[in-house]
Image (tube, rainbow, N blue to C red):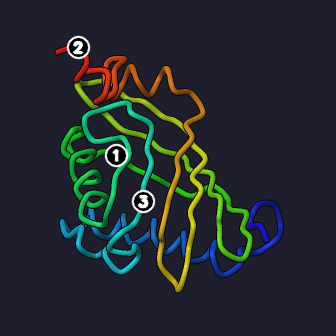
Amino acid sequence: MTDSGNQPAGPLGRFIRAFYEARRAAVREGDLSLLEGFVTPDVRWSEPEVGEHMGVLRGRDAVIDMIRRALDATGGSFELAVAGTVESATHVSALIDWSAVSGGRRIEGRELAVYEVRDGLITAAWFHPENIGDDRAFWGEGRGPAERQRAK
């Protein structure tokens, strides 16, 4: 099922939209613990390695900490919005529009997020940016955590 065009979102699409709405509320209220009810304690989360806060993460606390660090790095300006979803029985793909400001520079981007959802919780997530070069230039000056570690 899809929510692009004139078709409504199915249950997983609505769930992911609720997750992003909860993220906005959590940022507004300064309480990222509001996101705990959306992800399993042992969630597997894979972001491209483009900044200090990204990479392969294990566990809900690591994901919430990553979100906190992304917000800290951008003075709270890191925003995400769901543009559309497509889902199966256990997975939902969401097209995400995002923007952030850091060091006086603004970037806007788009990524494909793929979520595995079981028993009403996100169990895994994978993110695929539209333009990894721009992301790296903005978030990590061209090097992810593994690359920075090797450079030491």
* In the displayed structure image, the side of residue 32 where residue 92 appears, left or right: right
User: Disc 3, disc 2: CB below 8 Å?
Assistant: no
The three-letter code of the residue at mark 3 reads Arg
User: From the viewer's perspective, is the residue at label 1 or at label 3 nearer?
Assistant: 3
Which callout, 3 or 2, points at the residue further toward the start of the chain? 3
User: Disc 2, disc 1: CB below 8 Å?
Assistant: no
Occupied quadrant, residue 116 = bottom right
Q: What is the x, y in percent for residue 131?
A: 56, 27
Q: Which mark is residue 78?
A: 1
Q: Residue at x 20, y 70 (%)?
A: 31
Secondary structure of the residue carrying tag 3 is strand
Q: Residue at x 57, y 58 (%)?
A: 82
Q: Which mark is residue 44?
A: 3
Q: Which mark is residue 151?
A: 2
Q: What is the x, y in percent for residue 147?
A: 31, 21
Which callout, 2 or 1, points at the residue further toward the start of the chain? 1
Q: What is the x, y in percent for residue 41?
A: 32, 74
> Above or below — where is 144 with respect to 61?
above
> Above or below — where is 7 with respect to 138?
below
Number of marks in picture:
3
Q: Name the residue at the front extreme.
A: 150
Crowd band around label 3 with a 10 angstrom C-alpha radius: few (<14), some (14–19), many (20+): many
Q: Residue at x 23, y 73 (%)?
A: 33
Q: CA distance from mark 1 to mark 3?
A: 22 Å
